[in-house]
Amino acid sequence: MQGTPAVTHLPEPGHLRERTKLINPAGYSTQPPPSDRPVRIFVHGVFDLFHAEYYFAPIYITAVSATHVHFLKVTKNIFPETYLIAGVTTDNDTLRVKGLTVISAASRAEVVRGCKYVDEVVQDCEPVLTPEFMKERQIDYFAHSDTVEPDPYRFVKEDGKFLVVPRVKDGESTTQIISRVLRNRDKYVLRQLKNGASLKDMKITWLKLQWIKICSKVA
């Protein structure tokens, strides 16, 4: 597990950034942030098929779409000065907990590292947050959607270090993107062939391809 600085980006001037509304987790209160330095916030995730929704809307935590870029953006904008650390889980841990990924852990970490809202990436991050990790990385807050029992983040909430990023219905998740590809599988097969992919690459038989072509003409 390693932490590396992200790509250097020109910061948005503080007066131009719209603040994100601070929400306390249910039954808990959030401690005030340090005032003498940037606030260190940690998030972790799979970040597979890193994606964003492109639309213009007020950046409030209750109105933002559930995409990777927007999640990181609203988290970055909770406080005027934030140092955002993003943990990217390993392939094995992700396969065990959520299932097969499309992009490898190394590539997922590299993509997140290129996001202008991220200051540091912890590659091959442990999937379970611990007090030891919080202390080692000097984390002020952990940002995540609110959780229910059994709550793996109870200790973070009890310490007043949990920032709620609510789940919302707008936007596309990685699961929805994969489902969209599967729904349009035949179209993507034809697209891949046009762009040089082989039937062997896609594990498609010649007979299956003929069926796909017939169906595409009928549709």
Image: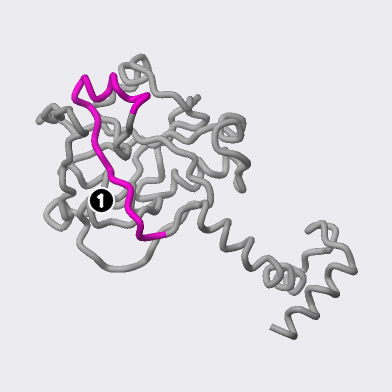
Tell me how many marks there are.
Answer: 1
Residue 37 in percent (x, y) is at: 16, 31
Taking depth in this image into account, of 37 and 217 the one nearest to the observer is 217
Residue 209 in percent (x, y) is at: 83, 70
User: In the structure shown, which secondary structural element does the residue marked by tag 1 occupy?
Assistant: loop
Q: The C terminus appears in which quarter of the rendering?
A: bottom right
Taking depth in this image into account, of 104 and 156 the one nearest to the observer is 156
Q: Residue furthest top?
A: 132
Relative to 130, is 61 on the left or the right? left
When the figure is inspected, residue 115 is found, relative to residue 41, above or below; the finding is below
The verdict on residue 165 being magenta is: yes
Relative to 131, is 38 on the left or the right? left
Residue 206 in percent (x, y) is at: 89, 68
User: Where are the magenta residues, as a range?
Assistant: 149-171
- Residue found at x 35% / y 43%: 118
- Residue found at x 29% / y 37%: 146
Relative to 122, is 22 on the left or the right? left
| Residue type pointed to by label 1 | Pro
Q: Residue furthest bottom?
A: 218
- Residue found at x 77% / y 70%: 193
Q: Main secondary structure of the magenta part?
A: loop
Taking depth in this image into account, of 203 and 217 the one nearest to the observer is 217
The verdict on residue 185 being magenta is: no
Pointer 1 residue: 11
Q: Quadrant of residue 38?
A: top left
